[in-house]
């Protein structure tokens, strides 16, 4: 599969899953725009690193995905958008009766509304070319729930719904839209929690991963950022031309339970 000549925009991609997706799309030959809300020299250096590794053009464009105007401006600034991966996301954990309103609003804005705004701005560009891919990084929490994650679960279920509507509105136009639903993925953020969990439960690394962190993931193995990126790249391939309006779980069996 070659994505040469395609431009991919990946939101929230200076770390974790988004960075893994950027690498896999670049490996497949796409030019990539990576993004976060910061505008530091290291963000631009990261773009140069990915470009050098895969021999494609990679640009970093700062845009705060909690801001509707900035979401739309990201697409305009990129100048092209064949592949849009809505990945930016944050989490906050608290009971509904204690959930801070500002956290609720931020999670809904970054995890859900940003995908609406970027998609709205990108669809005219895709329609002009008669080809496009919108891939929304949802979660196992787009299909199931956990307590204390009201905003996250609501936003991710919303992302799955938005993906279906986007698919219906673009069906037959060479454009597809799907949601990728990861279970637990080994990102730097998750890696950083392991030592604390080991201490708290007095367990070694393997045991705390299997028995505590991956309790709901039947494989008892993390998914990797490269596996999520590979799934996104597959959805960009010709084999996926008729895959639209659905979810693909990469969750070690979580949602089969
Ligand atoms: P992460 O914290 O490593 O990455 C989140 C990215 O979003 C970062 O690049 C961050 O800079 C960016 N971001 C945060 N706020 C932003 C804002 N206002 N504007 C622009 N960018 C912003 O976390 P991750 O685990 O890689 O998560 C990426 C996506 O995958 C999220 O949507 C998350 O919900 C989803 N996800 C993660 C897991 C997991 O286990 N890690 C599981 C399922 C789904």
Image (tube, helix red, strand yellow):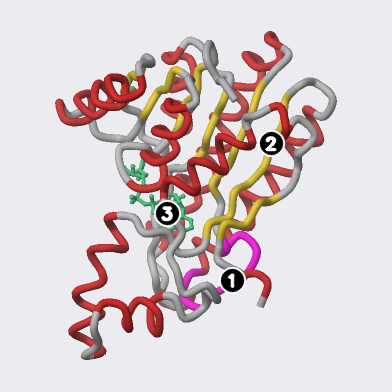
Residue highlighted by disc 3: 224
Residue name at image x 59 percent, y 71 percent: 254
Residue highlighted by disc 2: 177
Between the residue at mark 1 and the residue at mark 3, the CA separation in whole angstroms equals 15 Å
Q: Is residue 162 above or below residue 56?
A: below
Residue name at image x 17 percent, y 29 percent: 40
Q: Are the two marked residues, 2 and 1, in contact with CB atoms closer than 8 angstroms?
A: no
Of the two numbered discs 2 and 3 in the rendering, the one whose residue sits closer to the viewer: 3
The answer to if 144 sits in the magenta stretch is yes
Q: Identify the mark nearer the N-term, 2 or 3.
A: 2
234 left or right, relative to 171: left
Q: Residue furthest bottom?
A: 202
Residue 141 or residue 47, whichever sits in front: 47
Q: Callout 3 environment at 10 Å: few (<14), some (14 to 19), or many (20+)? A: some
Residue 237 or residue 142, whichever sits in front: 237
Magenta stretch in the rendered image? 140-149
Residue name at image x 64 percent, y 36 percent: 235
Between the residue at mark 2 and the residue at mark 3, the CA separation in whole angstroms equals 22 Å
Task: Check residue 254 in the rendering and tell me which mark sits there, or answer none.
Answer: 1
Label 2 residue SS: strand
Find residue 237 and report its horizontal and vertical position in percent.
Answer: 65, 29
- Which quadrant of the view contains residue 11? top left
Q: Residue furthest front?
A: 1
């Amino acid at each position: 599969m070659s994505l040469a000549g395609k431009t991919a925009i990946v939101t929230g991609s200076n770390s974790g899953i988004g960075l893994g997706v950027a690498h896999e799309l670049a490996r497949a030959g796409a030019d990539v725009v990576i993004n976060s809300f910061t505008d530091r020299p290291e963000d631009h250096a990261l773009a140069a690193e990915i470009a050098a590794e895969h021999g494609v053009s990679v640009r970093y464009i700062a845009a705060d995905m909690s801001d509707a105007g900035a979401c739309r401006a990201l697409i305009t600034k990129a100048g092209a958008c064949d592949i849009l991966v809505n990945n930016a996301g944050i989490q906050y954990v608290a009971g509904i009766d204690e959930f801070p309103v500002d956290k609720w609003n931020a999670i809904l804005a970054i995890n859900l509304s940003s995908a609406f705004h970027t998609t709205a701005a990108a669809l005219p560009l895709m329609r002009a070319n008669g080809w496009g891919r919108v891939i929304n990084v949802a979660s196992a929490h787009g299909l199931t729930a956990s307590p204390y994650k009201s905003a996250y679960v609501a936003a991710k279920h919303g992302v799955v719904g938005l993906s279906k509507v986007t698919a219906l509105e673009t069906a037959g136009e060479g454009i597809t839209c799907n949601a990728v639903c990861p279970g637990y993925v080994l990102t730097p953020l998750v890696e950083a929690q392991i030592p604390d969990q080991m201490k708290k439960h007095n367990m070694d690394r393997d045991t705390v991963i299997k028995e505590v962190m991956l309790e709901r993931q039947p494989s008892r193995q993390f998914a990797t950022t490269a596996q999520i990126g590979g799934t996104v790249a597959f959805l960009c391939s010709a084999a996926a031309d008729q895959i639209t309006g659905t979810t693909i779980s990469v969750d070690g069996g979580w949602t089969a339970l």
